Image: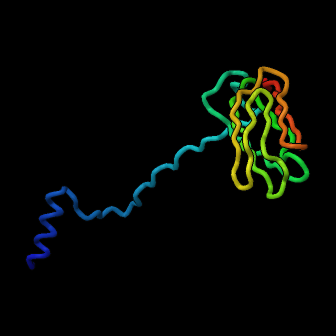
Amino acid sequence: MNRTTLALLAALAACGGAPSTSSEPTPKPSPPAAVATPSPSSNPTAGAPSDITRRVNVYVTAQGLDPKDVEANPKESLTLVFERDAGVGCAEVVVEGKPPAALADGKPAEVTLSAPASGSVAIACGDAKGTLTVVPATP
C-alpha cells in the first residue's frame, strides 16, 4: 500500500466512517407539512381574533375595483393591498374608518384593518367603489 491509501484509511477509521456495503437505499426525509391559509367560509375559528393577517390584492382599473367585493370573517385581520393601472385617475384609497392612503402608479398602497363583527366596510378609489362584507361563520 502506498502512503496516500494508508492516510485515507486512517482518516476514515478516525472519524468512525467506513464505506457502506449495504444495498438498501438511504431513506429520504419527509417533506415539510403544507400550511394552508383558511378561506373565510372554512375558517374553524371564525369570529375569534387572530394574530394572522390575511393579505388581499385589490386592483384599481378603468372598470373599477377588482375584486369589487371582499369577504371576511367577523373580526378577521386583513391587509388590503391596492394597486392601480397606469393612467387611472385615483390618487388615494379610502377605506371606511381608516385615513386615506396615497396610491401612485407602480407603488401599492396597503390598508390594514380588522373586519367588524358584522356588516360591511365601504372601499373607494375615485369613482371606483367596493365593499368589504363580513360573512357569518359556517358551522
Choose between 87 and 17: the one closer to the eye.
87
Q: Nearer the viewer, residue 51 or 20?
A: 51
Nearest the viewer among 89 and 20 is 89
21, 64: nearer the viewer: 64
**Residue at the image point whose x is 29% and y is 63% from the top:** 20
Rendered position, 15 above or below 102: below
Position of 31 with respect to 85 (left or right) is left
Farthest bottom residue in view = 2
Q: Quadrant of the C terminus?
A: top right
Q: Please indicate whether residue 94 sits to the left or right of residue 1 in the image.
A: right
The count of marks equals 0
Which quadrant of the figure has residue 43? top right
Residue 130's spot in the image, x, y percent? Answer: 87, 38
Q: In the rendered view, would you say 78 is above or below 3? A: above
Seen at 22% across and 62% down, the residue is: 18
Residue 73 coordinates in the image, percent (x, y): 76, 28
Identify the residue at horizontal 15%, vertical 67% (top origin).
Answer: 9
Position of residue 131 measured from the top left corner of the image (x, y, whole percent)? 86, 34
The residue at 82%/29% (across/down) is 121
Residue 97: image x %, image y %? 77, 26
Image-quadrant location for residue 55:
top right
> Which quarter of the figure is the N terminus placed in?
bottom left
Q: Is residue 77 above or below residue 82?
A: above
Question: Colour scheme in the image?
Answer: rainbow
